[in-house]
Amino acid sequence: MEIPEIIWEEYGMVQHPVLASLFGNGLINHTWKLSYGTEDYILQTINQLVFPDPWAIASNIDAIAQYLLIHHPAYLFVTPKKTKQGASMLVLNGVYYRIFPFVKDSLAKTVLETPEQAFEAARQFGLFTKNLAGFDCSQLKTTLPKFHDLVLRDKQFLEAIEHGNQERKMIAQELIEKLLAFRFITHRYQQIIINPNFKLRPTHHDTKISNVLFNSQDKAICVIDLDTLMPGYFISDLGDMMRTYLCPVSEEESDFSKITIRKAFYDAVIDGYCSEMGAELSKDELDAISYAGQFMVYMQALRFLTDYLNNDIYYGAKYPDQNLVRAGNQLVLLEKLMDLAI
């Protein structure tokens, strides 16, 4: 994808040449790193197949930025560079572009290596949510409707069992039965969403390690990638960290004997998150800390197996049983988490 030259004029970047190179390994948006004079920036497009309303993303980031500027002015929150018209994005030929300043002396990790890094990342996500404790969630727009709605994922799973590929259903029968036996996780979620002691907060919803920036001393300095910022429950952010930080192998691993829970990482995630959010959580929320990981891993297992039964229409597959393997992988991870909670 080529970058239209008019972008530089619209962003007032015409006094120096702009050098652009592809950046990162994101799967959703196109991303480039820009060098302009002595400054560096990140240029991104927004994938409208995933995010059909890009202006909702911009509105959320602007609202959060204004709140933090007033209430926590020292907090590092990366906001988009404005166009000459003062907009947070630029639309050219139906493509949405935005430019962020590149945070100097920062780096994003793709692999989590130590419990200390897990603690730092979890603390930073906790700090982000704590700093927004007074923010009115009704100001936020939903960028991905029902993204972490386990009731919906349960319904979709049951529909796929009934109406999906029946040949695949036979292949996956054992895995289907095992996941159905864990439906009590959905039932607990149904109780959570009607419990007034569980607060809707500004929630990141995508707390993988690459969405935290670190400095050269391995200290986390800020969170990034706010496209999925929406009202949500703390179990989404804490659960996603547990799902992606605790196991040394990814959801793509087909050798299930490699799936383990690193207890030191588990403790570090909880300690880091609660070091900032502990006082913000109600007793009922604190009691659901271990449930957070079960909630997120179970939901992902359901989504993978649902897609397998529906002929891989959502996640796609590089080989015929990839989503079956992914679902089995997440089931093993769930079982390990359940053992840890005993």
Image: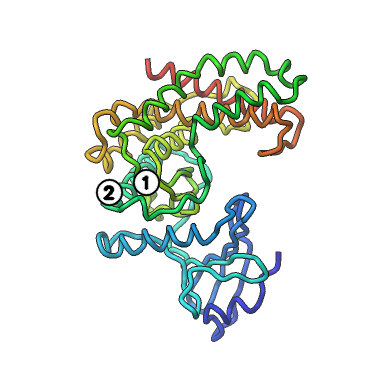
So how many labels did they put on this image? 2
Q: Amino acid at mark 1?
A: Phe
Name the mark on residue 180: none
Q: Please identify the quadrant where the C terminus is shown.
A: top left
CA–CA distance between discs 1 and 2?
13 Å
Above/below status of 289 relative to 64: above
Name the residue located 48 percent from the left edge and 66 percent from the top edge: 100
In the rendered image, the vertical position of residue 76 relative to residue 186, given as above or below: below
Left or right of 184, for residue 132: left
- Residue 126 is left or right of residue 152, and the answer is left
User: Disc 2 residue type?
Assistant: Ala
Q: Residue at x 46, y 31 (%)?
A: 246
Sequence-wise, the earlier of marks 1 and 2 is: 1
Q: Can you say whether 9 is above or below 104 in the image?
A: below
Q: Which mark is residue 125?
A: 1
For label 1, count other residues whose C-alpha is less than 10 Å away and answer few (under 14), some (14-19) or many (20+): many
Instruction: From the viewer's side, name the closer residue of 234 and 142.
Output: 142
Relative image position of residue 227 (x, y in whole percent): 50, 53
Q: Residues within 10 Å of mark 2 (few under 14, many from 20)?
A: some
Residue at 63 percent of width and 23 percent of height: 255
Whether residues under marks 1 and 2 lie with C-beta atoms below 8 angstroms apart, the answer is no
User: Which residue in the structure is indicated by mark 2?
Assistant: 133
Q: Position of residue 243 (x, y in %)?
A: 48, 32
